[in-house]
Image: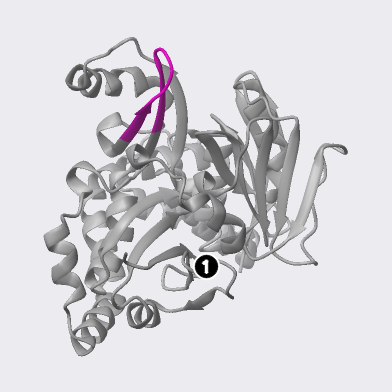
Amino acid sequence: MTEKLLVRFGAGSADNLEWLSLAQPDNQPASGTMIELAAAAQGKSLLLLLPAASVLLLEIELAVKNAAQLKKALPFALEDLLAEDVEDYHLVWLKQNRDKLAVAAIAHEALAAWLASFREAGLALEAAYPESLCLPYTPGQGALLIEDSNAVLRSAAYLGGGVDAEFLPQLLEKARAEGADFETLRICKGSEDTALPDGLPSTGLEIAIDQPLHFMASAAELLPAELNLLSGAYAVSSRQIGRWQQWLPAAIILAVALAVQSYALLHKYWQQQAELSELEVKTQELFKQTFPEVKRIVNVKAQADQQLAQLRKQQDFAGSSFMRLIYRSGLVLKDAPAVHLKKLNFLNGGLQLHLLADDIGQLEQFKQHLQSTVQVKIQSADSGANGVEAQLEIREK
């Protein structure tokens, strides 16, 4: 039987990986780059765990018995539950008792990008699952992993998610509102120094200090084949697996080097080309919000330069900082239709955004994208009937 490696992404970048042999789950997990994983994975199969925040787990009721009819009906049943068009998502599902259906949804773009890096490294994946489903679970007991500032929750047999640890109380509240029935919570902390966030229940907690992959290894062999994200267009045949495994080490190293140097730039270039027309519309909308006194827009760049020049007369440094923060936040805001800008203020070199998000997960994704270019501090976040209202302060790095 082929030895299986459990692989997950570490902190920092997509090329920072951790892996553990399920044949020897008590061993120390290894870590390294894609090249180092390729060397360690010779003759082995890989089970990839994707970040919990990137995969949406749902339970719905759908009274369809026939598999072909279910495949056609499922997108219509999920339309109101997804942030983007349902065609943008890859879906897998598991039929449960009666008409209940467990569904995992991930954006095609995100899944394709992750798989491309493994494919170009000559690494064949046997399966891919959200890491939340790899946390150990028993009825009546939820499972939680807290690592640095991230939290991953498994609230039911096929439900869970991932958020910034400071939003964990809201995630637990949402899980219970959606029917999670766990009475106790088993927690794994990445290190002794990892602090539990405020707002957790004071009773029913079982806390362990362990490596994340050790915590996940016991549940990895129990993952249902139906929720394997490598299905449909992403399925890998046994013939393909054999061909990838026969690559010479020199070819693997060459492919990985080319992928690391070129993939990110090429992917970003083509994505920006496709979104150019939409970006122009979003830019005009942002310009109107920023300079409401300008009633007629002829040339956004020229008019923005004029407004900037006026601001510089008042305070040169603050003005330039203001426009940079506006521009950088606008680039992220245009790609987050589930996050709505209610108002903004600029004070003491910081831009304050008052936002309304559909749910805590969308707000967390917005924050993570924004942090790539600016400093982000969440001043407040309150859940309500209309979603999550949050106050963010952003500053230049």
Read off the residue under disc 1.
Answer: 10
Instruction: Determine the residue positioned at 32% across, 35% down.
Output: 92
Residue 357, given in percent of the width and then of the height, sits at 56, 33
Is 95 covered by the magenta stretch? Answer: yes
Q: What's the residue at 74%, 67% (across, down)? A: 191
Spot occupied by residue 193 in the image (x, y as percentages of width and height): 80, 67
**Extent of the magenta region:** 92-103
- Is any atom of residue 380 visible in this view? no
Whole-percent x and y of residue 14? 42, 67
Q: Is residue 369 above or below residue 247?
A: above
Is residue 358 shown above or below 199?
A: above
Q: Secondary structure at mark 1?
A: loop
Residue 265 or residue 144, whichever sits in front: 144
Decide if residue 41 is in sight here: yes
Q: Nearer the viewer, residue 361 or 240?
A: 240
Q: Position of residue 257 (x, y in %)?
A: 27, 83
Question: Is the residue marked by circle 1 packed among few (<14), some (14-19), or many (20+) residues within 10 Å?
Answer: some
**Label 1 sits on what residue type?**
Gly
Of all residues, the one furthest to the top in this rendering is: 63
* Residue 397 in which image quadrant: bottom right
Q: Is residue 207 magenta?
A: no
**Residue at the far bottom in the pictured view:** 250
